[in-house]
């Protein structure tokens, strides 16, 4: 069974992919891990990607697709895989369709973790870090005992620019621009299964697992 896991930043895709990997006994194939592996090992694809990255350019879709193809051709993916972070746009989705067809395989479904923007902003912009010891806190999930002060060393807490609400909203806007057409693409193909991503990790995990098992039938 080949699945794609879709969701915005802050939806918990990484955590949920690991849980699905364990329950379904399918490898979790994350695009970020593939890039790091190819760059570290200085593979032909890694060196090619690095040329674009060093110039500040986006890595072309065909290079990314080739990395995914290489990973899916390994023996542990013979029975399926959970794709996370790929495809990112409709061109990659169409490229993946062709790739899987060439490999004699098919995509079984796309699990979309849906979370409202305001909830995502609450999750992503709640992170604060101690200036002295770098202990992380979250205003909702793991707040300090005293506002603005580190429990561990008494240092002042600060918020990184990437975690500020306005930056988070800008990231979400980019995500929507890139991914909304992809969601429509898979919905029209009859492959999209939308799962409510608001709630605790266990509840979302259970819903995703139920959806995945229905796709396997």
Image: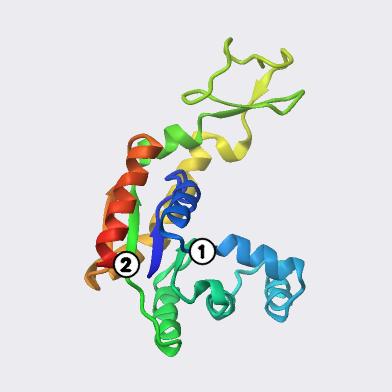
Q: Residue furthest top?
A: 146
- Asked if residue 187 lies left or right of residue 39, the reply is left
Q: Residue 196: percent from the left, percent from the top?
A: 28, 45
Q: Residue furthest bottom?
A: 102
Q: Residue 104: percent from the left, percent from the top?
A: 40, 87
Pick whichever, 209 or 132, lies toward us: 209
Nearer-N-terminus badge (1/2): 1
Q: Residue at x 72, y 68 (%)?
A: 39
Pick whichever, 137 or 131, lies toward us: 137
Q: Residue 214: percent from the left, percent from the top?
A: 24, 61
The residue identified by callout 1 is: 27
Q: Where, quadrant-wise, is the N terminus in this rendering?
A: bottom left
Mark 1 and 2 residues: CB-CB less than 8 Å, in contact? no
Q: Residue at x 44, y 81 (%)?
A: 95
Q: Residue at x 32, y 63 (%)?
A: 183
Q: Residue 38: percent from the left, percent from the top?
A: 69, 70
User: SS of the residue at dot 2?
Assistant: strand
Report crowding for label 1: few under 14, some 14 to 19, many 20 or more residues within 10 A (C-alpha).
many
What colour scheme does the image use? Answer: rainbow
Which mark is drawn over residue 109? 2
Which mark is drawn over residue 199? none
Q: Where, quadrant-wise, is the C terminus in this rendering?
A: bottom left
Report crowding for label 2: few under 14, some 14 to 19, many 20 or more residues within 10 A (C-alpha).
many
CA separation, marks 1 and 2? 16 Å
The answer, for residue 7, to whether it is visible in the render is: yes
Q: Quadrant of residue 97?
A: bottom left
- Asked if residue 85 lies left or right of residue 198, the reply is right
Pick whichever, 203 or 162, lies toward us: 203
Q: Is residue 119 above or below residue 71?
A: above
Q: Residue at x 29, y 66 (%)?
A: 216
User: SS of the residue at dot 1?
Assistant: loop
- Asked if residue 3 lies left or right of residue 73, the reply is left
């Amino acid at each position: 069974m080949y699945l794609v896991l879709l969701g915005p930043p802050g939806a918990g895709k990484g955590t949920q992919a690991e849980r699905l990997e364990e329950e379904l006994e399918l490898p979790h194939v994350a695009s970020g891990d593939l890039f790091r592996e190819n760059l570290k090992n200085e593979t032909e694809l890694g060196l090619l990607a690095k040329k674009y990255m060093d110039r500040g350019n986006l890595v072309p879709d065909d290079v990314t697709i080739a990395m995914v193809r290489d990973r899916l051709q390994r023996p542990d993916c013979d029975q399926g895989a959970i794709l996370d972070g790929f495809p990112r746009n409709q061109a990659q989705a169409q490229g993946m369709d062709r790739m899987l067809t060439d490999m004699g395989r098919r995509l079984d479904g796309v699990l979309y973790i849906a979370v409202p923007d305001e909830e995502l902003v609450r999750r992503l912009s709640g992170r604060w870090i101690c200036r002295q010891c770098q202990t992380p806190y979250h205003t909702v999930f793991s707040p300090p005992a005293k506002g603005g002060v580190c429990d561990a060393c008494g240092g002042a807490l600060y918020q990184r620019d990437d975690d500020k609400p306005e930056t988070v909203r800008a990231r979400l806007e980019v995500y929507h621009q890139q991914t909304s057409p992809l969601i429509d693409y898979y919905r029209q193909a009859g492959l999209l299964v939308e799962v409510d991503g608001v709630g605790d990790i266990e509840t979302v995990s259970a819903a995703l697992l139920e959806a995945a098992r229905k796709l396997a039938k």
